[in-house]
Image (cartoon, rainbow, N blue to C red):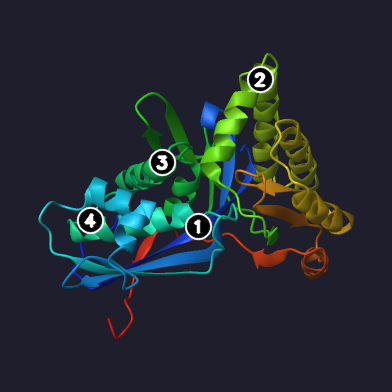
Amino acid sequence: MSDDPIPAAAMPLSARAPGKCIVFGEHSVVHGRPELVLAIDLHTQVLARPAEQMTLNGEPSAVRENAYLRRALEELWPPGAPPVDWRTVSTIPRSAGLGSSAALSSALATTILATRGGADRSVLAEQSFRIERGAQGVGSPGDTSASVAGGLVAVNAGEGTLLWEVTDGTQRWTVRRIADPGWVWVVAYSGVPRSTGETVRAVGRRLAEPDGRALLDRFEEVARAGIDAVRAEDRDEVGRRMDENQSLLRTVGVSHERLEKLLEAAAPVAAGAKLTGAGAGGSVIVLPRPGKEVDVLHRLRRAGGQPYVVRSSPTGASLVAPPTDA
């Protein structure tokens, strides 16, 4: 796992950070309830090298157009520092609920903090969240914390090894590491892009209705039971709780017919399955029954999904060797 500080480094330098899947608790975590997030072995890599003007993938205009790089520079780039050519490459599909923005935010923060003398991971987690939250306007630190830490992280759950606390000034989230059972998961992008900010705000309005508190309590009950089941390596119970979590996500209106089609296709060979991330499009995460990983993959592909077999990424955001031509 990634517990070491980010060291100081000079340009050119490169950083890589993993995407994520939310196993339990999306949306309710924004309101302070528990969440379980899995860093997955799909990654975004950022290369930074000195240049005559500030560019992103060779385009000067893209620096202002990309909300995440713009926010990272506003938050962390020293005034008067020399210009940089930023290059990005990613295996994470965008707007798919698989943490592309968290990985980009974490990789950018890792790169900039390294040039400024390095940083502890708690600082990296705080800054990565500030970048993503600033770009999206809403959200919680679960995604960026998983990207920074690697492995499995539980937010507001009270179990596991304390990693850090993150605050937005009004709310505080506690992030802990829990043991990874080493399972193979399958995720599938529905092909329907979604907007995290718009969806989170819509759910916030739904939870403001009279039954909102009861729904949040139920989200919390399911997430806590699911986290306990992961810690016990009880695959069947984890699957049952995933299915319950999906039922709650339907109730708050963030499922989608394309997601439901994928979930229906996977069900005969899945211990459990649900959407992951903001919903209203995006992706599903499936916990296959033992030995059925390939069967799940084929079923999701035939149902129109873009599937990936994934494991936990044991390494979170970190510096990596830049390309030899950098």
For the residues labelled 4 and 1, the Cα–Cα distance comes to 23 Å
Q: CA distance from mark 3 to mark 1?
A: 14 Å
Q: Which residue is mark 2?
A: 212
Q: Disc 4 designates what residue?
A: 118
Q: Quadrant of residue 222?
A: top right
The answer to whether mark 2 and mark 1 are in CB contact below 8 A is: no
Three-letter amino acid code of the residue under disc 2: Gly
Q: Position of residue 156 (x, y in %)?
A: 52, 31
Q: Is residue 114 above or below residue 125?
A: below
Q: Nearer the viewer, residue 1 or 251?
A: 251
Measure the alpha-carbon separation of dots 3 and 4.
Answer: 22 Å
Q: Which residue is mark 1?
A: 100
Q: Would you place residue 218 above or below residue 134 in this image? A: above
**Disc 3: which residue:** 133
Q: Residues within 10 Å of mark 1 (few under 14, many from 20)?
A: many
- Can you say whether 127 is above or below 27 in the image? below
In which quadrant will I find the C terminus?
Answer: bottom left
Q: Nearer the viewer, mark 4 or mark 1?
A: 1
Of pointers 3 and 4, the one earlier in the residue sequence: 4
